[in-house]
Amino acid sequence: MSLNIEITEEKKNPLIDRAEITFRIDHFGSGTPNRLDIKKKIAALQGSNEKLTVIVDLVTQFGAYHTIGKAHIYTDANELQYYEPFHIQVRNLEKDKRTEIYQLKKRKESYKHLFEY
């Protein structure tokens, strides 16, 4: 399935040093696309680092064939770690890393090495 992403709004936030993007994805006849695929496509469209791109929100209304989403693109990994909540950072990783992070956190062991910033 090819993703048809249309960027509807783009703002620069100089205080936090990030770009805030609102986008729309049309996916007629299929479900909501995978967050990681969307992340790769937006990073490619904006010419940014995929590891510093975070999908914050995806909303698909019932019965609709389009999704509205928000993404933040950072230039510095420290800013990303400071401003994005833990669950959003984890949500933007592959499934195996997510489960490993949650297992390590549950056992109160170190998990910071699994983030690739």
Image (cartoon, rainbow, N blue to C red):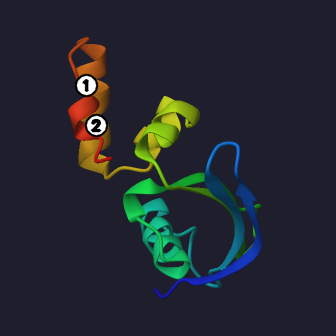
Left or right side of 65 for 110: left
* Kind of residue indicated by mark 2: Thr
Kindly identify the residue that appears in the image at 48 percent across and 31 percent down.
Answer: 86
Kindly identify the residue that appears in the image at 22 percent across and 20 percent down.
Answer: 110
- Above or below residue 112? Residue 38 is below
Of residues 72 and 39, the one nearer the viewer is 72
Kindly identify the residue that appears in the image at 49 percent across and 34 percent down.
Answer: 87
- Can you name the residue that lies furthest to the top here? 108
Tell me where residue 90 sits by quadrant.
top left
Check disc 2 and report the residue beneath it.
Answer: 99
Query: Residue 34 location in percent, x, y?
Result: 47, 65
Of residues 101 and 81, the one nearer the viewer is 81
- Above or below residue 112? Residue 75 is below
Q: Residues within 10 Å of mark 1 (few under 14, many from 20)?
A: few
Of residues 3 and 117, the one nearer the viewer is 117
Kindly identify the residue that appears in the image at 25 percent across and 27 percent down.
Answer: 111
- Above or below residue 70? Residue 4 is below
Check disc 1 and report the residue beneath it.
Answer: 103
Tell me where residue 102 sits by quadrant.
top left
Query: Residue 100 location in percent, x, y?
Result: 23, 34
- Above or below residue 78? Residue 58 is below
Measure the alpha-carbon separation of dots 1 and 2. Answer: 6 Å
Label 2 sits on a secondary structure element that is helix
Q: Residues within 10 Å of mark 2 (few under 14, many from 20)?
A: few
Query: Residue 105 location in percent, x, y?
Result: 30, 19
Q: Verify CB contact (< 8 Å) between mark 1 and mark 2.
A: yes
